[in-house]
Image (spheres, rainbow, N blue to C red):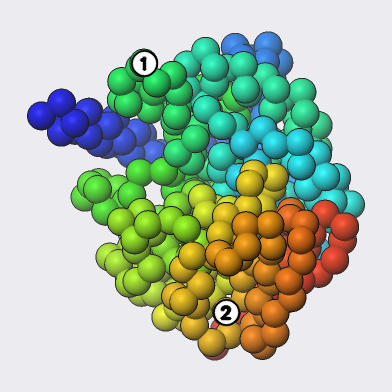
């Protein structure tokens, strides 16, 4: 009975969060300067909107037919799941060398984001990674560790506190939001599954529908497909009402984290990429049997916990004895979208160009 009550309260918080999400897109377009101060860092929050607005003013051109073109091809990075790891330093160093226009993330930058411990860990994140968040507009997402907190606190309290600390640090009113840049729309989804409420599903479909002829990129924490060690109740690995929406509205790519590895697959015409190699412990490839021909993936082997494996889209495999950490680079030039997995040493492991016009 107690468990059911906790679940109900968490869903209630999620529903209230979703209601305000419907207005977030207009806020992202119009905000140019954030004058608020984070109570955690005592400085301006790491709000990506002002920097993104500068990019739009510099590179966007509106044509006579209303379409928006870019003076310079789009380039952004995708990374996540550091959880305070020392390896995040090398990941951001490589990311800086790649000189993206902006980044979208797949969450879990702190191990616990709720309560007083969350505040302390966000301060640490500020000290170690704030320089990158300030230099490049970095769009955050809410993962399970952002809403994790003291064990002696009820789950619904940790969720509410985690959302508050997340918003305070990044200056965003709601973890559900969207923004546009050039010919693309980006939609951020949070930790709670969209299928847990009609309001969330309605919000998602509305955002997808409004994208019209734009490329659509989804970024979130929990994946829909994986080859890692997450359970099937957590990551279904099959078509769901949400993935059916992605197929219906021709979503270009869905970026996620949660399972600490790399995985790229195409399902029903949609690219699904797990980019969860920003420093946290790399997970085993327990569900490698779920991969289909043409998939690329990297993780820890099941047979030997000290061995790592990269499986290319062509089926070739490389094994090595030291974990690598990485980012995913995404370059958009018209209808062509190129995804590239790059490790902290600058080596490219997987490159794939997708023609979104087909």
Residue 204: percent from left, percent from top: 36, 54
**Label for residue 295?**
2
**Label for residue 152?**
1
The residue sitting at 69% across, 71% down in the picture is: 310
Looking at the rendered structure, the secondary structure element under dot 1 is loop
Marks 2/1: CA–CA distance: 42 Å
Q: Which of pointers 2 and 1 lies earlier in the amino acid sequence?
A: 1
The residue sitting at 62% across, 16% down in the picture is: 120
Quarter of the figure with the N terminus: top left
Q: How many marks?
A: 2
Quarter of the figure with the C terminus: bottom right
Residue 218: percent from left, percent from top: 50, 58
- Mark 1, Cα crowd under 10 Å, few <14 / some 14-19 / many 20+, is few
**Along the horizontal axis of the image, is 115 left or right of 314?**
left
Return the residue nearer the eye: 63 or 36: 36
> Is any part of residue 344 visible from this angle?
yes
């Amino acid at each position: 009975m107690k468990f059911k009550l906790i679940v109900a309260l968490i869903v209630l918080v999620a529903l209230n969060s979703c209601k305000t999400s419907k207005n977030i897109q207009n806020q992202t377009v119009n905000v140019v300067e954030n004058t608020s101060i984070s109570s955690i860092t005592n400085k301006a929050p790491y709000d990506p909107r002002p920097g993104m607005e500068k990019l739009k003013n510099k590179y966007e051109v509106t044509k006579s037919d209303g379409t928006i073109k870019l003076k310079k091809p789009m380039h952004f990075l995708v990374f996540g799941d550091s959880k305070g790891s020392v390896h995040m330093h090398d990941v951001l160093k490589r990311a800086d060398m790649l000189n993206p226009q902006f980044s979208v993330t797949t969450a879990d930058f702190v191990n616990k984001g709720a309560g007083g411990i969350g505040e302390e860990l966000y301060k640490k994140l500020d000290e170690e990674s704030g320089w990158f968040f300030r230099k490049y507009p970095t769009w955050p997402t809410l993962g399970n560790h952002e809403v994790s907190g003291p064990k002696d606190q009820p789950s619904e309290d940790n969720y509410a506190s985690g959302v508050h600390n997340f918003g305070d640090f990044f200056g965003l009113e709601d973890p559900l939001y969207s923004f546009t840049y050039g010919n693309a729309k980006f939609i951020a989804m949070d930790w709670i599954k969209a299928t847990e409420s009609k309001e969330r599903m309605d919000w998602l479909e509305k955002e997808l529908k409004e994208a019209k002829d734009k490329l659509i990129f989804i970024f979130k924490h929990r994946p829909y497909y994986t080859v890692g060690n997450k359970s099937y109740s957590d990551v279904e690995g099959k078509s769901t009402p949400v993935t059916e929406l992605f197929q219906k509205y021709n979503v270009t790519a869905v970026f996620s984290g949660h399972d600490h590895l790399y995985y790229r697959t195409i399902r029903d015409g949609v690219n699904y990429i797990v980019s969860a190699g920003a420093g946290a412990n790399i997970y085993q490839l327990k569900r490698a049997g779920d991969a289909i021909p043409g998939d690329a993936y990297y993780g820890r082997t099941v047979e030997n916990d000290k061995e790592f494996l990269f499986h290319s889209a062509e089926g070739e495999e490389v094994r090595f004895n030291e974990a690598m950490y990485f980012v995913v680079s995404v370059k958009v030039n018209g209808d062509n979208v190129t995804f590239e997995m790059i490790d902290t040493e600058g080596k490219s492991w997987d490159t794939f160009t997708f023609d979104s016009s087909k």
